[in-house]
Amino acid sequence: MNFGNKLVRKMKTKYNILFDKACLRDFQKLSPDVQNLMRIKIQDLANDPRPNGCVKLSGTSPAKYRIRCGDYRIIYAIHDHILEILIIEVGHRREIYR
């Protein structure tokens, strides 16, 4: 972007990804194919924590988001002030919201 004589660059910030302990156990129980697909989605969150298709879950405090990964879902919270994403739950869509 150009503002007068000054050139301003967009700074890319990368978020740190953390897993809840119970979530990590659930993640490791999934099949290797599903783990690889989820790993790609989770790594993409580091660059864009609110990608197209993410949904803010209503009735949660602090705010939680979900992204789809085939028939599986990833539930996470974003802490913008410390550039951190906490993965809270992973699982099949029929079980994740219970």
Image (cartoon, rainbow, N blue to C red):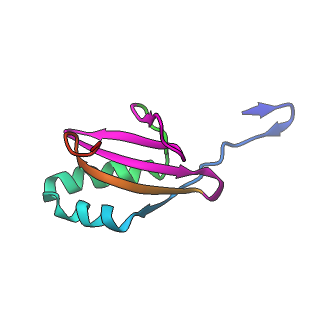
Please tell me whether residue 38 belongs to the stretch shown in magenta.
Answer: no
Q: Residue at x 40, y 56 (%)?
A: 87
Residue 11 in the figure: left or right of residue 62: right
The residue drawn where x is 31% and y is 65% is: 22
Which quadrant would residue 2 be assigned to in this image? top right
Task: Residue 27 in the image: state x and y as whole percent.
Answer: 25, 60
Quadrant containing the N terminus in the rendered view: top right
Q: Residue furthest right?
A: 5
> What x and y, as percent, mark residue 60?
48, 42
| 59 lies left or right of 11 | left
The reply to whether the magenta stretch includes residue 65 is: yes
Q: Does 21 appear above or below 93?
A: below
- Identity of the residue drawn at 35% across and 68% down: 21
Residue 13: where, in percent of width, then height? 59, 52
Could you tell me residue 38's position as x and y percent?
27, 51
Q: Is residue 57 left or right of residue 72?
A: right
In the image, what residue occupies the spot 52% across and 43% down?
63
Indicate left or right for 35 with 56 as reference.
left
**Residue 82, image quadrant:** bottom right
The range drawn in magenta is 53-82
The residue nearer to you, when weighing 22 against 32, is: 22
**Viewer-proximal residue, 44 or 85?**
85
In the picture, the quarter occupied by the C terminus is top left
Please count the marks in the image. Answer: 0
